Image: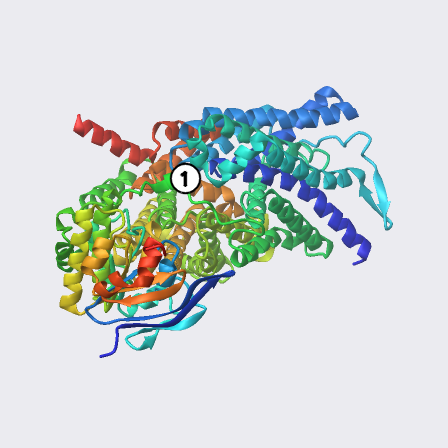
Amino acid sequence: MSFASILIQLLNGLAAASSLFLVSAGLSLIFGVTRIVNFAHGSLYMLGLYIAYSLIEMLGRTPLGFWGGVVLAALAVGLVGIVIETAVLRRIYRAPELFQLLATFAIVLVIKDAALFAWGPEDLVGPRAPGLGGAVEILGKRIPVYDLLLIAIGPLVLAIMHLLLRRTRWGALVRAATQDREMVGALGVDQAKLFTSVFFVGAVLAGLGGALQIPREPANLDLDLSVIADAFVVTVVGGLGSLGGALLAAVLIGVAKAFCIGLGFSKLTLVAEFVIMGVVLVARPYGLLGKPQAVARTAGEAPPPLSPPRWQFPVGWIAVLAVIPLLTDQYVSVVLIDIACFALFAVSLHFIMGPAGMVSFGHAAYFGLGAYAGAVLFKKAGLPMEAALLLAPFCAGLFAVVYGWFCVRLSGVYLAMLTLAFAQISWSIVFQWDALTGGSNGMVGIWPAAWLADKGVYYYVALGLCGAGIAVLWRVLFSPFGYVLRAGRDSPLRAEAIGIDVRGFQWAAFVLAGTCAGLAGAVFAFSKGSISPSVVSIGQSTDGLVMVLLGGVDTLVGPVVGAAVFTWLRDALARETDFWRAGLGLVILLIVLLFPQGLVGGLKALYARWRAA
Amino acid sequence: MSAVLQVEGLRKAFGGVQAVADVSFAVDAGELLALIGPNGAGKSTCFNMLNGQLAPDNGVVRLGGRDIVGLSPRAIWRLGVGRTFQITATFSSLSVRENIQMALYSHAGRLRALFARFGAALVPEADALLEQVGMLDQATRPCGVLAYGDLKRVELAMALANQPRLLLMDEPTAGMAPRERVALMELTARLARARGIAVLFTEHDMDVVFGQADRIVVLDRGVLIAGGTPEEVRTNEAVRAVYLGSAH
């Protein structure tokens, strides 16, 4: 490995860092002012790429056409940002933070299908920048001129943003709102306008980041989630709200990735950035240049108390579920098995994010690792299917022991991002370890033992196992252990003062939830007969979040209802249309706007109002 | 008989500021000691070093003869210390009774039970404590909806659930109505004397301090300037100077 080729990879890494910085800066800015974690920020980046592609095709591949296209694309994405803010987010600023998150998930789905509709499923390869298509020779290696330009753009945008924030009235308001939103509101500043403008600027940055990548990367529909994961890592490593930190982190990660490739460990690239993130967060919990988060005073509304389920309720449902396969065709059983798996998955996620107050963006790690553990134990270790199915959850639990140890050291958004990082590490391992997991192809032939081969029989086993998992989690929630979790969420200070080791309990909760999610994954794997890395993907994690939030995070049965509605809706829509994601997204948006406490919470409120009338 | 709490040569500096300088005092069983002083005198810093929140630069804190410097707040609870906070901290999504039960469960070392029903045990014990602080009629309300003065009482009951040797109360009556304040401290004094609990409290309300404390120590700019019975402190020249200005 020569010095020259390291240099090449270094420059390559810096060029990639520029766009990453732009997206992350936008994300960070929006979070700072509105406290919204905008999951759709990767989608805005993707839109920037697509729109720039079309505009350049329209305006012609001239320098004017290219740069005009890039700038117009960024502005167009800014307009999309304004639409998102005014049409959706503005209506739910008073809703709990998690609900805003749900809304941005829905926007991800809608934008993905809008792009599919407008540009089709094929990757679109954009033009090179006219006049900058050449390369300069450095130490005998050819470096694209465009890359050098990109390297300059990152610091340039940072400088411009710095001037905007330090030298303008708008910038002063943004900085003030980042520190103390309530106070800025109390001083009579029009928050709606401020938020819209911040969303516009954040979206423009994302769009610009995407558009600038036109000569380097084809526009494709998977960019949204992969970019948002990278942007999360950059924002968190740099420190939420710190633009300088975002640039530093983007460069650090870009360079680390480039070195992995340069040194011949290209398989490590996916893991590398998340390892950096894990190390930084444990050493500096608020990121390299970040400060502890400002405390939001209006978040003071306490979550309502949880009420335990009445015994009639599950008994009635078990009876109904037991007779369903006798009365309906096999298809219903298949859907119900899916629902059972996702219900346990969602309940286990709710267990840590509701009562224990630890939001996870990466719960699919345990679901997916449970699924893969089952498959590997069965196919590679040659265990009987029954043993593989029952051991798999504990494998997932072991991962939760390791991941959880790091995660419980953080809280809030930082904790959520770290869970995402661990999920991505798991995904990369599964994706790249061809010999064990089959890599991107996944594994096939994971069929249940002969006595379970019939779907009708497997239905009862799936229902029994998932039902048992849910019953255990619910029982624990109303035990002293479960109350400790709620106590630790409500007031860590008081919990410590009455002798409670909050972290220890949270860690144990993490492991229990991970084990149950692993059980759900293993049951799922054997019901399908095959698995692919998508069971560990961000998409799977967000599905879980949507189920919990859709049903209502402050209720017990909410996650089950959310899982059922989500699974059924996705299935029904996918059979009707290619654009089922958009349909799903629109339904979620509608629910968000109509039932800000989730389906079960909303129905409960309606019922209470009806009773009172 | 040796003191329950013994503080010797406690020091803490933040940057160049000596927040607490060489403070020593002791509290006996069944005794109420008030720690007073103007704003910024170092009362809260002093408190936070006693309860494990803050590590002192120097000095010894003995609880029943054992040095507790360096122990975590939860280890200090295990040694028989109950606390109430200046800004109340309770579990807002749990009911008043459940808050007390939580402290009782912790005291009994029964928190790790995974499958027991939380509501099935320690209810009579919790209700007895609630009765003592006059909160039994609100036992089923969530703490999140309580009035501030009531939260202070819940905190007192949680502290008592630990069957403490020592109660640390930081501004126990802040935010309460004047009559409530005296009532709460009278209650504390009664319980402390009956059970031999040592009580250390900070307080701004001088009626409460001079009416209820057995002894008073006065801090000014991190230094202990006086100590003694309420009568001695009332007539102490240094104290009068600090509170009323040197012209008097």
Residue depicted at x 66% and y 39%: A158
Q: Where A119 sits versus B210, above or below?
A: above
Q: Quadrant of residue B211?
A: bottom left
Name the foreground residue: A534 vs B210.
B210
Tell me: residue A43, above or below residue A16.
above
Hey, which residue is sitting farthest top in the picture?
A58
Residue A38 visible, this angle: no
In the image, residue A72 above or below residue B64: above
> x%, y% of residue A4?
81, 53
Could one spot residue A128 in this view of the protein? yes
Q: Nearer the viewer, residue B242 or A583?
A: B242
Residue A57 locus on image (x, y percent):
71, 23
Quadrant assignment for the N terminus of chain A: bottom right
Q: In the image shown, does A595 or A286 lie closer to the viewer?
A: A286
| Residue corresponding to mark 1 | A98
**Residue at screen point 33% across, 44% down:** A456
Left or right: B149 in relation to A368: left
Q: Residue furthest bottom?
A: B1
Q: Secondary structure at mark 1?
A: helix
Residue at point 64% right, 34% down?
A: A210
Measuring 28% from the left and 47% from the top, which residue is drawn there? Answer: B92
How has the structure been colored for display? rainbow
On the image, the x and y values in percent for residue A443 come to: 53, 50
Count the marks: 1
Going by the numbered disc 1, the residue's amino acid type is: Leu
Q: Quadrant of the C terminus of chain A?
A: top left
> Which chain letter matches label 1?
A
Label 1 crowding class (10 Å Cα cut-off): few <14, some 14-19, many 20+? some
Residue B196 vs B102, above or below: the answer is below
Q: Nearer the viewer, residue A531 or A349?
A: A349
Residue A420 percent coordinates (x, y): 50, 48
